[in-house]
Amino acid sequence: MMSESDTKFLQKLYEFINQEKKNLQCPEEGPNELRYIVYRSAFNKVIGRTTAFKRLLLIIKSEYDNIIRQLKRREKAEESEQSVVNTCQRLAAELNERTTILQTHGVELQEDIRTHRSINLESLMKGLSESEDPDVLQKHLKDLEIQKALLMDYRSQGVPLEVQTELEAELQAAERHRDQLSFENKHLRVLFMRLSCVVNRLTCWEQERQEVPLEGVLGSTLQNIQHLSSEPNDEGHGSSCNIDSELFEDEEPTGVDESKLLQDHLDSFVELLESAQYEEAALHAARSPRGVLRNADTMELFAGVQAPPASTPPALLFFRALLFTTAKGDRLSGDVSLQGVRCSLQHGNIHLVTHAVSQDKLMFTEELGDILTEHAQNNHHVLDQCLALASIVYEACKVHKKTALSMCRRGLTHSAAEFMKLNLTAD
C-alpha cells in the first residue's frame, strides 16, 4: 500500500514522462536516445526521493549508464568497420582497373619488343659482316681495355663486405641506445611535469588562501593530472600540468578493479550524503573516478537536498568543488555550467561566477549570457558586473548583437559603436 504523497509523486512523475516524450516527439518503438534521457531524468527524481534504497538505485543507474556507453562505443566501432570495408572495396575496384590497364600496356610492350628484336637482328647481321675488318677489331679491343682499367680503379676505392657488416651492426647498436635514452627521457619529463603541476597548484592555493583543505587540494591535483595530455611545445617541454595519458595506462585500474573502485566510491559518496557531510560529499563527487559523478544529475541530486539554516547550499558546494578540481584549459559541461551559475546567482555568490568565467572553466553558451543579463536587470547592485560577464560570454559565442547591447546597457556607447562597426553589417 502506498501513501497519498507517494501516489501523487508517481502520478506527477508519469505526467512528466508523458509530457516530455510528447514535447521531444519520441517514437513509440525502437531505441531512441531522447526517450533514454527522459527516463534517466525521471529515475534521478526517484533516487532523490528515496532514502533506504538510494545506494542501490545509484549503483543500478551507474551500471545502466555504463552499458549505454558501451553500446554507443560498439555502434561507433561497427560504423568504423563498415567504413573500412567500403574503403577496401573501393581500393579493390581501383586495383582491378589498374590491373586491366597494365595488362593492355603489357601487350603493347610485347609488340614493341618483337619489333625491336627484328630490327636488332638486322643490325647484328650487318655488324658481323663489318667485324671481319682487322682495324675495327683493334679499335674495339682498345675500348675494352680502357673500360677494364676504369673498373679496376673503381674496385680499389671500395671496402670489403665485412667492414660494411660491422658498420651496420654499430649503427643498429647506436639506434637502440638512442631509443632507450629517449624512453628514459620521456619518463623523466613526465615525472618533472607531475611535480611541477603539484608545486604550481600548492603555490596557487597558498597565495589565494582558498577554503579547500590541503588534503583536498592534493587529492584533486593527483586525480586531475591523469586526465591531461598535450604535445610538447617548441622548446621540447609540455605545460606544467600536461601529461602523456598513455604513460598512466598501467597505473589505472581496469576490469574488476575499476568496477570495485567505482562501487566503493559510490558507497562513500552515499554515506557522506546521508550523514549530512555535504562539503565532503561535494569534494568526493568532484573527484570521482573518470568523472562519473561530475554531471548534471549529481547537481540535481545536491539541489534536492535541504541544508541546515544559515549554511552554504549543497548544490553551491558541489559547483565550487567542480571549479576547484577543474584543471586549467578544461571546461565543465554546458548543463553543469548553467545549473552552477543559476545556483550561484540565486544565493548571491557573484564572486564564484566571476572566477569561473575569468578562468575559462565554463562552457560558454548564449543561454548562459541570457541568465547573467536577466540577473543584472533584476539586481541593480551587481548590474555592471553581470553585464560585463555576459559580454564576455556573448563575444565568445559570436552573438554580436547581444554583445553590443550589453555594452550599451553599461553605458559604453562609444565602445559599442566601434564594436558594431567591426562585427555587424549595415542591416
Image: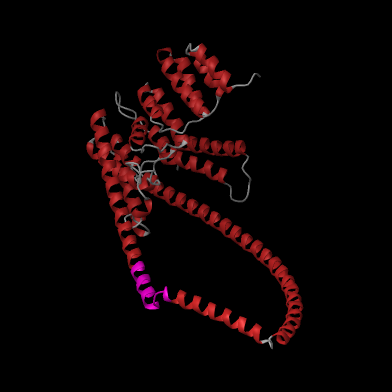
Residue at 39% across / 75% down in the picture? 159
Q: Magenta stretch: residue 164 in it?
A: yes
In percent of width and height, residue 156 lies at: 42, 76
Image quadrant in which the N terminus is located = top left
Image quarter of the C terminus? top right
- SS majority, magenta: helix
Residue 373 at x, y percent in the picture: 49, 20
Image coordinates of residue 136 in percent, x first then y, are 66, 83
From this view, report whether residue 291 is shown above or below residue 136: above
The vertical placement of 151 against 86, above or below, is: below
Looking at the picture, tell me which residue is in the foreground, 315 or 424: 424
Q: Position of residue 197 (x, y in %)?
A: 29, 41
Count of residue discs = 0
Residue 216 in view (yes/no): no
Q: Nearer the viewer, residue 199 or 132?
A: 132
State whether residue 106 is above or below residue 316: below
Identify which residue is drawn at 50% across, 38% down: 10
Magenta-drawn segment: 156-172
Q: Which residue is at the far front? A: 135
Q: Is residue 329 left or right of residue 126?
A: left
Q: Is residue 213 left or right of residue 186?
A: left
Is 168 within the magenta?
A: yes
Residue 325 can be seen, yes or no: yes
Residue in front for this viewpoint, 335 or 225: 225
Residue 356 in which image quadrant: top left
